[in-house]
Image: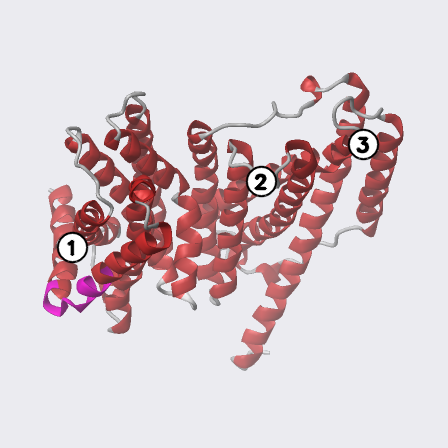
Amino acid sequence: MPDISSDRSAATPPPRTSVWLGFVAFAAVIFAQTFSILTSPADRDMGHLQKIMYVHVPAAWMTFLAFLVVFVYSMRYLWKQNENDDLLAASAAEVGAVFNGLTLMLGMIWGRPAWGVWWVWDARLTSTLVLFLIFVGYLALRAFVDDSVQRAKWSAAVGAIGAINVPIVYMSVKWWRTLHQPQSSPGTLDPAYTLGLRLNAIALLLVLIYFIRKRYEIARLERAIEDFAQAAAMGGK
Amino acid sequence: MSLRDDWRRTRAIAMKDLTTEIRAKAGFNGVASLAVTILILLGLALGPDAAALRNAAVGAVWLATLFSGVLAFNRSFQVELESGALEPLLLYPGPRWPIFAGKLLGNLIFVGLMVLIVMLVGIVLFGITVPDTWPELLAVVALGVVGLVVLGTFYASMSSRSRAREVLLPLLLFPMLVPVLLAATTASKALLGADLMHEAGAWIRLLIGFDTLFLVATFLAFEHVIEA
Protein backbone atom coordinates (compact mmCIF):
# COMPACT_ATOMS: atom_id res chain seq x y z
CA MET A 1 0.00 0.00 0.00
CA PRO A 2 1.49 3.37 -0.92
CA ASP A 3 2.41 5.64 1.94
CA ILE A 4 0.19 8.69 1.69
CA SER A 5 0.73 9.84 5.24
CA SER A 6 3.90 11.76 4.42
CA ASP A 7 2.11 14.78 3.01
CA ARG A 8 -0.71 14.82 5.54
CA SER A 9 0.27 16.50 8.75
CA ALA A 10 -2.92 15.36 10.47
CA ALA A 11 -1.77 11.77 10.12
CA THR A 12 0.49 12.05 13.15
CA PRO A 13 -0.46 14.09 16.21
CA PRO A 14 1.47 17.34 16.63
CA PRO A 15 4.36 17.16 19.11
CA ARG A 16 3.90 18.73 22.53
CA THR A 17 6.67 21.05 23.63
CA SER A 18 7.38 20.69 27.30
CA VAL A 19 6.65 23.77 29.41
CA TRP A 20 9.77 22.88 31.32
CA LEU A 21 11.97 23.62 28.32
CA GLY A 22 10.54 27.14 28.38
CA PHE A 23 11.14 27.53 32.10
CA VAL A 24 14.69 26.22 31.80
CA ALA A 25 15.43 28.46 28.81
CA PHE A 26 14.24 31.65 30.48
CA ALA A 27 15.84 30.73 33.81
CA ALA A 28 19.09 30.21 31.89
CA VAL A 29 18.76 33.67 30.32
CA ILE A 30 18.18 35.31 33.71
CA PHE A 31 21.09 33.41 35.24
CA ALA A 32 23.50 34.08 32.35
CA GLN A 33 22.61 37.77 32.21
CA THR A 34 22.93 38.25 35.96
CA PHE A 35 26.19 36.34 36.05
CA SER A 36 27.80 38.22 33.19
CA ILE A 37 26.63 41.65 34.32
CA LEU A 38 27.86 41.08 37.87
CA THR A 39 31.19 39.45 37.04
CA SER A 40 32.44 41.40 34.02
CA PRO A 41 34.55 44.47 34.78
CA ALA A 42 33.72 47.76 33.05
CA ASP A 43 35.46 47.92 29.67
CA ARG A 44 38.44 50.29 29.43
CA ASP A 45 37.02 52.17 26.44
CA MET A 46 33.34 51.39 26.47
CA GLY A 47 32.52 51.12 30.17
CA HIS A 48 29.26 49.36 30.86
CA LEU A 49 28.17 49.80 27.26
CA GLN A 50 30.04 46.57 26.65
CA LYS A 51 27.25 44.61 28.43
CA ILE A 52 25.09 44.90 25.31
CA MET A 53 27.44 42.35 23.77
CA TYR A 54 25.93 39.63 25.96
CA VAL A 55 22.69 39.76 24.02
CA HIS A 56 23.80 41.27 20.72
CA VAL A 57 26.51 38.74 19.84
CA PRO A 58 24.62 35.55 20.83
CA ALA A 59 21.51 36.88 19.07
CA ALA A 60 23.55 37.31 15.89
CA TRP A 61 24.79 33.71 16.20
CA MET A 62 21.23 32.47 16.71
CA THR A 63 20.10 34.41 13.63
CA PHE A 64 22.55 32.55 11.45
CA LEU A 65 21.73 29.25 13.15
CA ALA A 66 18.02 29.82 12.45
CA PHE A 67 18.76 30.59 8.82
CA LEU A 68 20.81 27.40 8.61
CA VAL A 69 17.76 25.49 9.89
CA VAL A 70 15.62 27.19 7.22
CA PHE A 71 18.13 26.16 4.55
CA VAL A 72 18.46 22.55 5.71
CA TYR A 73 14.72 21.97 6.09
CA SER A 74 13.92 23.75 2.82
CA MET A 75 16.34 21.46 0.98
CA ARG A 76 14.87 18.47 2.84
CA TYR A 77 11.39 19.51 1.81
CA LEU A 78 12.41 19.79 -1.86
CA TRP A 79 13.95 16.35 -1.57
CA LYS A 80 11.28 14.46 0.42
CA GLN A 81 8.15 16.64 0.05
CA ASN A 82 7.20 16.11 3.68
CA GLU A 83 5.01 18.98 4.80
CA ASN A 84 6.38 18.94 8.35
CA ASP A 85 9.79 20.00 7.04
CA ASP A 86 8.15 23.04 5.48
CA LEU A 87 6.42 23.96 8.73
CA LEU A 88 9.67 23.62 10.66
CA ALA A 89 11.55 25.80 8.16
CA ALA A 90 8.81 28.42 8.44
CA SER A 91 8.94 28.33 12.25
CA ALA A 92 12.71 28.77 12.18
CA ALA A 93 12.34 31.68 9.75
CA GLU A 94 9.92 33.50 12.03
CA VAL A 95 12.07 33.02 15.11
CA GLY A 96 15.18 33.87 13.09
CA ALA A 97 13.60 37.14 11.95
CA VAL A 98 12.96 38.08 15.59
CA PHE A 99 16.56 37.39 16.58
CA ASN A 100 17.73 39.18 13.44
CA GLY A 101 15.72 42.27 14.36
CA LEU A 102 17.06 42.11 17.92
CA THR A 103 20.64 41.91 16.63
CA LEU A 104 20.16 44.95 14.41
CA MET A 105 18.41 47.04 17.07
CA LEU A 106 20.98 46.29 19.76
CA GLY A 107 23.81 46.87 17.30
CA MET A 108 22.45 50.33 16.53
CA ILE A 109 21.90 51.16 20.21
CA TRP A 110 25.51 50.16 20.82
CA GLY A 111 26.86 51.87 17.70
CA ARG A 112 25.46 55.30 18.51
CA PRO A 113 27.66 55.90 21.60
CA ALA A 114 30.56 53.69 20.47
CA TRP A 115 30.95 54.87 16.87
CA GLY A 116 28.97 58.10 17.07
CA VAL A 117 26.50 56.95 14.40
CA TRP A 118 23.44 54.71 14.39
CA TRP A 119 24.44 53.01 11.20
CA VAL A 120 27.52 52.39 9.05
CA TRP A 121 27.48 50.64 5.69
CA ASP A 122 29.90 47.99 6.78
CA ALA A 123 29.89 44.39 5.54
CA ARG A 124 28.50 42.68 8.61
CA LEU A 125 25.82 45.28 9.36
CA THR A 126 24.67 45.56 5.80
CA SER A 127 24.57 41.82 5.17
CA THR A 128 22.68 41.27 8.44
CA LEU A 129 20.15 43.83 7.26
CA VAL A 130 19.90 42.18 3.83
CA LEU A 131 19.45 38.84 5.60
CA PHE A 132 16.56 40.40 7.53
CA LEU A 133 15.00 41.55 4.26
CA ILE A 134 15.36 38.04 2.81
CA PHE A 135 13.57 36.66 5.91
CA VAL A 136 10.84 39.28 5.42
CA GLY A 137 10.43 38.29 1.76
CA TYR A 138 10.19 34.62 2.74
CA LEU A 139 7.53 35.34 5.38
CA ALA A 140 5.62 37.66 3.00
CA LEU A 141 5.54 34.91 0.37
CA ARG A 142 4.02 32.54 2.93
CA ALA A 143 1.41 35.13 3.88
CA PHE A 144 0.37 35.77 0.27
CA VAL A 145 -0.06 32.15 -0.88
CA ASP A 146 -3.15 30.23 0.23
CA ASP A 147 -2.65 26.76 -1.20
CA SER A 148 -0.57 24.78 1.29
CA VAL A 149 1.37 22.66 -1.22
CA GLN A 150 2.14 25.70 -3.37
CA ARG A 151 3.21 27.64 -0.28
CA ALA A 152 5.47 24.82 0.87
CA LYS A 153 7.20 24.32 -2.48
CA TRP A 154 7.66 27.99 -3.19
CA SER A 155 8.93 28.94 0.22
CA ALA A 156 11.32 25.97 0.19
CA ALA A 157 12.78 27.26 -3.09
CA VAL A 158 12.95 30.84 -1.79
CA GLY A 159 14.47 29.69 1.52
CA ALA A 160 17.17 27.58 -0.14
CA ILE A 161 18.09 30.15 -2.79
CA GLY A 162 18.02 32.98 -0.24
CA ALA A 163 20.40 31.07 2.02
CA ILE A 164 22.85 30.46 -0.85
CA ASN A 165 22.95 34.19 -1.40
CA VAL A 166 23.87 35.14 2.17
CA PRO A 167 27.64 34.51 1.87
CA ILE A 168 27.69 36.24 -1.53
CA VAL A 169 25.94 39.30 -0.10
CA TYR A 170 28.44 39.35 2.74
CA MET A 171 31.42 39.07 0.41
CA SER A 172 30.16 41.71 -2.00
CA VAL A 173 29.46 44.26 0.72
CA LYS A 174 32.84 43.52 2.26
CA TRP A 175 34.57 44.33 -1.00
CA TRP A 176 32.43 47.37 -1.40
CA ARG A 177 33.43 48.86 1.93
CA THR A 178 34.52 47.69 5.31
CA LEU A 179 34.67 49.19 8.77
CA HIS A 180 33.89 47.03 11.77
CA GLN A 181 35.80 45.89 14.75
CA PRO A 182 36.99 42.29 14.50
CA GLN A 183 34.17 39.86 15.10
CA SER A 184 33.56 39.12 18.77
CA SER A 185 34.20 35.50 19.61
CA PRO A 186 35.55 33.93 22.78
CA GLY A 187 38.97 34.02 21.06
CA THR A 188 39.13 37.80 20.58
CA LEU A 189 37.86 38.64 24.04
CA ASP A 190 39.51 39.36 27.32
CA PRO A 191 39.11 36.21 29.47
CA ALA A 192 37.03 38.22 31.96
CA TYR A 193 34.22 38.35 29.41
CA THR A 194 34.35 34.94 27.72
CA LEU A 195 32.49 32.85 30.29
CA GLY A 196 29.62 35.34 30.34
CA LEU A 197 29.40 35.32 26.55
CA ARG A 198 29.40 31.53 26.41
CA LEU A 199 26.74 31.21 29.10
CA ASN A 200 24.53 33.73 27.30
CA ALA A 201 25.01 31.91 24.01
CA ILE A 202 23.84 28.65 25.62
CA ALA A 203 20.87 30.43 27.22
CA LEU A 204 19.79 32.01 23.95
CA LEU A 205 20.27 28.70 22.15
CA LEU A 206 17.76 27.17 24.58
CA VAL A 207 15.38 30.06 23.90
CA LEU A 208 15.84 29.56 20.14
CA ILE A 209 15.07 25.84 20.40
CA TYR A 210 12.05 26.50 22.63
CA PHE A 211 10.65 29.19 20.32
CA ILE A 212 11.11 27.12 17.16
CA ARG A 213 9.56 24.05 18.77
CA LYS A 214 6.63 26.00 20.14
CA ARG A 215 6.05 27.75 16.81
CA TYR A 216 6.29 24.43 15.00
CA GLU A 217 3.73 22.90 17.35
CA ILE A 218 1.34 25.79 16.64
CA ALA A 219 1.95 25.51 12.89
CA ARG A 220 1.08 21.80 13.04
CA LEU A 221 -2.13 22.54 14.92
CA GLU A 222 -3.04 25.25 12.40
CA ARG A 223 -2.54 22.78 9.57
CA ALA A 224 -4.64 20.16 11.35
CA ILE A 225 -7.46 22.71 11.67
CA GLU A 226 -7.12 23.65 7.98
CA ASP A 227 -7.30 19.99 6.99
CA PHE A 228 -10.29 19.44 9.22
CA ALA A 229 -12.12 22.48 7.86
CA GLN A 230 -11.42 21.33 4.32
CA ALA A 231 -12.70 17.84 5.03
CA ALA A 232 -15.79 19.28 6.70
CA ALA A 233 -16.43 21.56 3.73
CA MET A 234 -16.23 18.56 1.40
CA GLY A 235 -18.79 16.80 3.60
CA GLY A 236 -16.27 14.17 4.63
CA LYS A 237 -16.53 14.61 8.37
CA MET B 1 18.36 14.74 -30.31
CA SER B 2 16.41 15.54 -27.20
CA LEU B 3 18.54 18.55 -26.38
CA ARG B 4 17.68 19.91 -29.79
CA ASP B 5 13.98 19.44 -29.06
CA ASP B 6 14.41 21.28 -25.78
CA TRP B 7 16.09 24.14 -27.59
CA ARG B 8 13.20 24.24 -30.08
CA ARG B 9 10.75 24.45 -27.18
CA THR B 10 12.81 27.19 -25.55
CA ARG B 11 12.90 29.16 -28.76
CA ALA B 12 9.19 28.65 -29.39
CA ILE B 13 8.26 30.06 -25.98
CA ALA B 14 10.64 33.01 -26.31
CA MET B 15 9.35 33.77 -29.80
CA LYS B 16 5.74 33.52 -28.64
CA ASP B 17 6.38 35.98 -25.78
CA LEU B 18 8.25 38.39 -28.03
CA THR B 19 5.61 38.19 -30.77
CA THR B 20 2.93 39.02 -28.21
CA GLU B 21 5.01 41.96 -27.07
CA ILE B 22 5.68 43.20 -30.61
CA ARG B 23 2.00 42.98 -31.58
CA ALA B 24 0.77 44.70 -28.42
CA LYS B 25 3.71 47.13 -28.05
CA ALA B 26 1.95 48.74 -25.08
CA GLY B 27 3.89 46.58 -22.62
CA PHE B 28 7.37 47.48 -23.75
CA ASN B 29 6.53 51.11 -24.41
CA GLY B 30 4.97 51.42 -20.97
CA VAL B 31 7.86 49.82 -19.12
CA ALA B 32 10.54 51.72 -21.08
CA SER B 33 8.71 55.02 -20.57
CA LEU B 34 8.51 54.33 -16.86
CA ALA B 35 12.26 53.65 -16.77
CA VAL B 36 12.99 56.95 -18.48
CA THR B 37 10.57 58.77 -16.17
CA ILE B 38 12.30 57.32 -13.09
CA LEU B 39 15.64 58.44 -14.52
CA ILE B 40 14.35 61.98 -15.03
CA LEU B 41 12.86 62.10 -11.53
CA LEU B 42 16.16 60.91 -10.05
CA GLY B 43 17.94 63.61 -12.01
CA LEU B 44 15.58 66.23 -10.61
CA ALA B 45 15.91 64.89 -7.08
CA LEU B 46 19.71 64.74 -7.16
CA GLY B 47 20.49 67.78 -9.36
CA PRO B 48 21.03 70.43 -10.52
CA ASP B 49 24.77 70.39 -9.76
CA ALA B 50 26.35 68.81 -12.87
CA ALA B 51 29.24 67.15 -11.02
CA ALA B 52 26.91 65.58 -8.45
CA LEU B 53 24.69 64.31 -11.24
CA ARG B 54 27.61 62.71 -13.04
CA ASN B 55 28.60 60.95 -9.80
CA ALA B 56 25.09 59.65 -9.25
CA ALA B 57 24.51 58.66 -12.89
CA VAL B 58 25.50 55.00 -12.62
CA GLY B 59 23.36 54.40 -9.55
CA ALA B 60 20.42 56.19 -11.15
CA VAL B 61 20.63 54.11 -14.35
CA TRP B 62 20.75 50.83 -12.40
CA LEU B 63 17.92 51.79 -10.08
CA ALA B 64 15.71 52.84 -13.00
CA THR B 65 16.50 49.47 -14.63
CA LEU B 66 15.66 47.53 -11.46
CA PHE B 67 12.40 49.32 -10.71
CA SER B 68 11.02 49.06 -14.22
CA GLY B 69 12.46 45.58 -14.88
CA VAL B 70 10.32 44.25 -12.04
CA LEU B 71 7.21 45.15 -14.04
CA ALA B 72 8.42 43.16 -17.03
CA PHE B 73 8.82 39.90 -15.10
CA ASN B 74 5.30 39.63 -13.71
CA ARG B 75 3.98 40.53 -17.16
CA SER B 76 5.76 37.63 -18.80
CA PHE B 77 3.74 35.10 -16.78
CA GLN B 78 0.62 37.23 -16.70
CA VAL B 79 -0.11 36.55 -20.37
CA GLU B 80 -0.39 32.80 -19.71
CA LEU B 81 -2.28 33.17 -16.46
CA GLU B 82 -4.97 35.46 -17.84
CA SER B 83 -5.83 33.09 -20.66
CA GLY B 84 -5.40 29.93 -18.58
CA ALA B 85 -2.60 28.79 -20.87
CA LEU B 86 -0.09 27.75 -18.22
CA GLU B 87 -1.71 24.35 -17.49
CA PRO B 88 -1.78 23.26 -21.16
CA LEU B 89 1.83 24.42 -21.45
CA LEU B 90 2.76 22.20 -18.50
CA LEU B 91 0.84 19.27 -19.97
CA TYR B 92 3.03 19.11 -23.07
CA PRO B 93 5.42 16.15 -22.93
CA GLY B 94 9.07 16.72 -22.12
CA PRO B 95 10.92 18.45 -19.32
CA ARG B 96 9.73 21.76 -17.85
CA TRP B 97 13.00 23.64 -17.88
CA PRO B 98 12.60 24.80 -21.51
CA ILE B 99 9.57 26.80 -20.30
CA PHE B 100 11.83 28.63 -17.88
CA ALA B 101 14.59 28.97 -20.47
CA GLY B 102 12.14 30.39 -23.00
CA LYS B 103 10.72 32.92 -20.55
CA LEU B 104 14.28 33.81 -19.56
CA LEU B 105 15.32 34.40 -23.14
CA GLY B 106 12.25 36.53 -23.85
CA ASN B 107 12.81 38.61 -20.72
CA LEU B 108 16.54 38.99 -21.51
CA ILE B 109 15.73 40.55 -24.86
CA PHE B 110 12.94 42.68 -23.35
CA VAL B 111 15.03 44.02 -20.46
CA GLY B 112 18.18 44.24 -22.59
CA LEU B 113 16.46 46.59 -25.05
CA MET B 114 15.03 48.60 -22.17
CA VAL B 115 18.49 48.97 -20.59
CA LEU B 116 19.91 50.23 -23.89
CA ILE B 117 17.30 52.99 -23.94
CA VAL B 118 17.88 53.81 -20.26
CA MET B 119 21.64 54.00 -20.82
CA LEU B 120 21.35 56.27 -23.82
CA VAL B 121 19.00 58.60 -21.96
CA GLY B 122 21.31 58.46 -18.93
CA ILE B 123 24.35 59.40 -21.03
CA VAL B 124 22.49 62.41 -22.41
CA LEU B 125 20.77 63.60 -19.24
CA PHE B 126 23.64 63.10 -16.81
CA GLY B 127 26.40 64.33 -19.11
CA ILE B 128 28.47 61.13 -19.24
CA THR B 129 31.46 60.91 -21.58
CA VAL B 130 31.63 57.43 -23.05
CA PRO B 131 35.02 55.99 -22.05
CA ASP B 132 37.46 54.01 -24.23
CA THR B 133 36.65 50.99 -22.12
CA TRP B 134 33.08 50.86 -23.42
CA PRO B 135 33.22 47.17 -24.45
CA GLU B 136 34.00 46.24 -20.83
CA LEU B 137 31.24 48.55 -19.69
CA LEU B 138 28.80 46.80 -22.00
CA ALA B 139 29.96 43.44 -20.61
CA VAL B 140 29.24 44.66 -17.05
CA VAL B 141 25.79 45.83 -18.11
CA ALA B 142 25.08 42.52 -19.87
CA LEU B 143 26.20 40.48 -16.84
CA GLY B 144 24.13 42.64 -14.51
CA VAL B 145 21.07 42.26 -16.71
CA VAL B 146 21.52 38.46 -16.77
CA GLY B 147 21.59 38.37 -12.95
CA LEU B 148 18.51 40.58 -12.75
CA VAL B 149 16.57 38.61 -15.34
CA VAL B 150 17.46 35.13 -14.00
CA LEU B 151 16.23 35.85 -10.48
CA GLY B 152 13.42 38.12 -11.68
CA THR B 153 11.97 35.48 -14.02
CA PHE B 154 12.31 32.78 -11.39
CA TYR B 155 10.59 34.74 -8.61
CA ALA B 156 7.93 36.00 -11.02
CA SER B 157 6.98 32.38 -11.79
CA MET B 158 5.76 32.27 -8.18
CA SER B 159 4.74 35.84 -7.36
CA SER B 160 2.61 36.23 -10.50
CA ARG B 161 0.42 33.39 -9.22
CA SER B 162 0.07 34.76 -5.67
CA ARG B 163 -2.09 37.44 -4.15
CA ALA B 164 -0.44 40.89 -4.03
CA ARG B 165 2.06 40.05 -6.76
CA GLU B 166 3.03 43.69 -7.31
CA VAL B 167 4.37 43.90 -3.77
CA LEU B 168 5.70 40.40 -3.44
CA LEU B 169 8.07 40.34 -6.41
CA PRO B 170 10.20 43.37 -5.44
CA LEU B 171 10.14 42.23 -1.80
CA LEU B 172 11.61 38.87 -2.81
CA LEU B 173 13.83 40.08 -5.62
CA PHE B 174 15.55 43.26 -4.44
CA PRO B 175 17.35 41.88 -1.35
CA MET B 176 18.62 39.02 -3.51
CA LEU B 177 20.00 41.48 -6.06
CA VAL B 178 22.23 43.34 -3.60
CA PRO B 179 25.44 41.68 -4.92
CA VAL B 180 24.42 42.44 -8.54
CA LEU B 181 23.66 46.05 -7.72
CA LEU B 182 26.95 46.54 -5.86
CA ALA B 183 29.04 44.77 -8.48
CA ALA B 184 27.38 46.43 -11.47
CA THR B 185 27.47 49.96 -10.05
CA THR B 186 31.00 49.76 -8.66
CA ALA B 187 32.41 48.20 -11.82
CA SER B 188 30.57 50.68 -14.05
CA LYS B 189 31.84 53.61 -11.98
CA ALA B 190 35.39 52.25 -12.13
CA LEU B 191 35.21 51.85 -15.90
CA LEU B 192 33.78 55.34 -16.38
CA GLY B 193 36.72 56.68 -14.38
CA ALA B 194 39.31 54.76 -16.48
CA ASP B 195 39.56 52.03 -13.77
CA LEU B 196 42.77 53.35 -12.25
CA MET B 197 42.55 50.90 -9.35
CA HIS B 198 41.98 47.91 -11.68
CA GLU B 199 39.04 46.86 -9.56
CA ALA B 200 36.53 46.28 -12.34
CA GLY B 201 37.99 42.83 -13.06
CA ALA B 202 37.18 41.48 -9.60
CA TRP B 203 33.61 42.74 -9.81
CA ILE B 204 33.15 41.24 -13.27
CA ARG B 205 34.30 37.89 -11.89
CA LEU B 206 31.80 38.24 -9.05
CA LEU B 207 29.02 38.94 -11.55
CA ILE B 208 30.00 35.91 -13.65
CA GLY B 209 30.02 33.73 -10.50
CA PHE B 210 26.67 35.08 -9.31
CA ASP B 211 25.02 34.62 -12.71
CA THR B 212 26.32 31.06 -13.13
CA LEU B 213 25.39 29.99 -9.60
CA PHE B 214 21.84 31.30 -9.74
CA LEU B 215 21.31 30.15 -13.32
CA VAL B 216 22.02 26.58 -12.14
CA ALA B 217 20.06 26.96 -8.88
CA THR B 218 16.96 28.42 -10.53
CA PHE B 219 16.94 25.82 -13.30
CA LEU B 220 17.08 23.08 -10.65
CA ALA B 221 14.36 24.68 -8.53
CA PHE B 222 12.02 25.65 -11.37
CA GLU B 223 10.68 22.12 -11.82
CA HIS B 224 9.43 22.14 -8.22
CA VAL B 225 8.06 25.64 -8.39
CA ILE B 226 6.13 25.51 -11.64
CA GLU B 227 4.18 22.31 -11.03
CA ALA B 228 2.79 23.47 -7.70
Work out whether B197 lies above or below A51: above
Q: Is residue B68 visible?
A: no
Badge 1 crowding class, 10 Å Cα cut-off, few under 14, some 14 to 19, many 20 or more, is many
- Tag 2 subunit: A
| B170 or B51, nearer to the observer | B51
Q: Residue lying farthest front?
A: B49
Q: Is residue B140 visible?
A: yes
Residue labelled with disc 2: A119
Label 1 close to label 2 by CB (< 8 Å):
no
**Secondary structure state at the residue bearing disc 3:** helix
Q: Which residues are magenta?
A: B22-31
Residue B14, which numbered label? 1
User: x, y percentage for residue B54?
Assistant: 29, 41
Q: Is residue B23 magenta?
A: yes
Foreground pick, A217 / A57: A57
Q: Is residue A233 magenta?
A: no
- Provide residue B45's location: percent of width, then percent of height: 37, 54
**How many neighbours does mark 3 have within 10 angstroms: few (below 14), some (14-19), or many (20 or more)?**
few
Indicate left or right for A58 with A122 as reference. Answer: right
User: In this figure, which residue is indicated by the disc labeled 3?
Assistant: A48
Query: The C terminus of chain B lies in which quarter of the figure?
Result: bottom left
Residue shown at the point (84%, 30%) measured from the top left? A36
Q: Find the distance from the CA under tag 1 to the CA under tag 3.
A: 62 Å
Badge 2 amino acid: Trp
| Real-space CA distance between mark 3 and mark 2, rounded to the nearest whole angstrom | 21 Å
